[in-house]
Image (cartoon, helix red, strand yellow):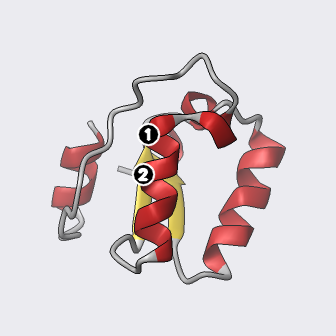
Amino acid sequence: MCKHFAQVRGWPLAETVVETTPERPLELREGWARVMEAVSDGSAEVIAVYDAAQIGLGLDEFEVMQRDLRMREVVLTAVDRAPR
């Protein structure tokens, strides 16, 4: 779903990260650590998750994370909330 979402928008897909430790808090998850590495090294410009809940956030927290990432010139989007 996220891959298709990126493709129809013409966004190049750098990497697909599948979370292997979803039971952990976000900051301790292996997949999220990889996503943040990509943000830090500049290889991620857009992070698409299927649902904000996948990264364990309520809507308010998700919006705060969106703002924080936007300050780093990275877009965070939830596919289930985006216009198709």
Outermost residue to the right: 60
Q: Determine the image quadrant of residue 46.
A: bottom left
The dot on residue 60 is none
Q: Residue at x 49, y 23 (%)?
A: 21
For the question of whether residue 82 can be seen, the reply is: no
Left or right: 44 in relation to 33 = left
Q: Position of residue 47 (x, y in %)?
A: 44, 58
Q: Residue at x 27, y 50 (%)?
A: 5
Q: Determine the image quadrant of residue 72.
A: bottom right
In the rendered image, which residue does mark 2 sit on?
Answer: 34
Q: Are there few (<14), some (14-19), or many (20+) residues within 10 Å of tag 2?
A: some
Where 22 sits versus 84, above or below? above
Callout 1 amino acid:
Gly
Left or right: 56 in relation to 47 = right
Q: Secondary structure at mark 2?
A: helix
In the rendered image, which residue does mark 1 sit on?
Answer: 31
For the question of whether residue 83 can be seen, the reply is: yes
Quarter occupied by the N terminus: top left
Q: Residue at x 67, y 42 (%)?
A: 27
CB atoms of marks 2 and 1 within 8 Å? yes
Q: Position of residue 34 (x, y in %)?
A: 42, 51
Q: Position of residue 58 (x, y in %)?
A: 77, 34
Callout 2 amino acid:
Arg
In this view, the residue in front, 37 or 57, is 37
Left or right: 63 in relation to 17 = right
In this view, the residue in front, 15 or 46, is 15
Where 25 sits versus 13, above or below? above
